[in-house]
Image (spheres, rainbow, N blue to C red):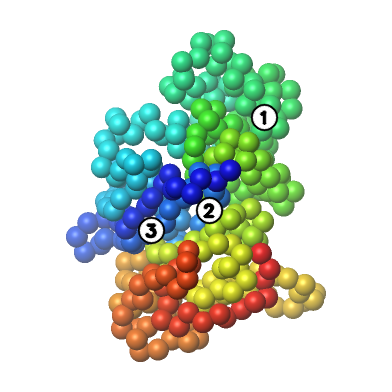
Amino acid sequence: MISRQPILEVEGLSTSFGRGRHVLPAVRDVSFSLRQGEVLGLVGESGSGKSVTLRSILGLSRRYGQVSGSVRWKGRDLCTMSERALRPIRGNEIAMIFQEPMTSLNPLLTVGRQLTETLEVHTDLTRAGRRARAIEMLDHVGIPAAASRLEDYPHQFSGGMRQRVMIAIALAAEPQLLLADEPTTALDVTIQAQILDLILRLSDEMNMAVILVTHDLGVVAQTCESVAVMYAGRIVEQGSVREVLSAPRHRYTTGLMQSVPQDVPPRTPLFSVPGAPPSLLNLPQGCAYAARCDAVTDRCIGTRPPLEEIAPGRRVACYHPEPLCQRYSA
């Protein structure tokens, strides 16, 4: 059951890299909240700031960038906490699945060692207890003959199985929030469906909140309850999946939806959003989407539209937030 009170509140989160004249604002003034058991989809093109947002929540961007704003986790501001104070939260209360398991898993350590390492840090289990828990988690994520695979190395697993290992490691300490950074990238459609079903099933069983980063609105429609659309480091539209996908209010959201093929006859050219995202090193003064928008006005070019609430739980950063498309059913 989803609690009405948010367990995660992100306010004005901004992350930039570089200094002086070469500052790159990867995330700009991002705000959202998440309740226990809720699944939030964070969607947008590559480079829109989705992955950096997840890393900034956990404080992983602070070593190389400048992070400001507030990330309140159960009343504590993670942005002001030291690395030492964050250590018991990472992997224990908040866990993360990274985008590419082959680069996230240590190729020199067995998967069993990498699983028990997490348990060693975050639990009081004995060595035998950690081994038993590791076998249980591998079995839980659907890896056959789990006990016999503990001594195998990452390269001995297929792409889908490596992703399952990553999920097992992330969930070993039973976190309350899972940050999933495109967990199905480079997997075939069948394995993608299995991984998403697995994450949703575990979320339901553990009453765990999930932030799912993806560029695929089809995945969001099937798995998420709420969605935040990001463009050029900002959230441009936010609300429940049903509301946003049935009647988007931002042209960028509409473009993403129209890019999903639906009942397209053979040899028909597929739709793509015209133009390209702006360089983060040279962002326009007004709306970052203005150069690609078919309804742009002088106001859009001169002043950046704020993210404003247009209905309860529904926010849009656009000066012309009219319903634009009703061709996609959530």
The residue closer to the viewer here, 264 or 39, is 39
Q: Is residue 77 left or right of 290 when viewed as pictured? A: left
The residue closer to the viewer here, 235 or 150, is 235
> What's the residue type where badge 2 is placed?
Leu
Circle 1 SS class = helix
- Res 240 visible: yes
Give the spatial CA distance, label 1 vs label 2: 23 Å
Q: Earlier in the sequence, mark 3 or mark 1?
A: 3
> What's the residue type where badge 1 is placed?
His
Give the spatial CA distance, label 2 vs label 3: 13 Å
Q: Earlier in the sequence, mark 1 or mark 2?
A: 2
Q: Position of residue 94 (x, y in %)?
A: 45, 37
Task: Give the residue at mark 3.
Answer: 31
Q: Which residue is found at the position 50% from the left and 34% from the top?
A: 175
Q: Which residue is found at the position 76% from the left and 74% from the top?
A: 264
Give the spatial CA distance, label 3 vs label 1: 34 Å
Q: The C terminus is located in which quarter?
A: bottom right
Residue 311 in the image: above or below residue 110? below
Circle 2 SS class = strand
Q: Is residue 235 left or right of 155 when viewed as pictured? A: left
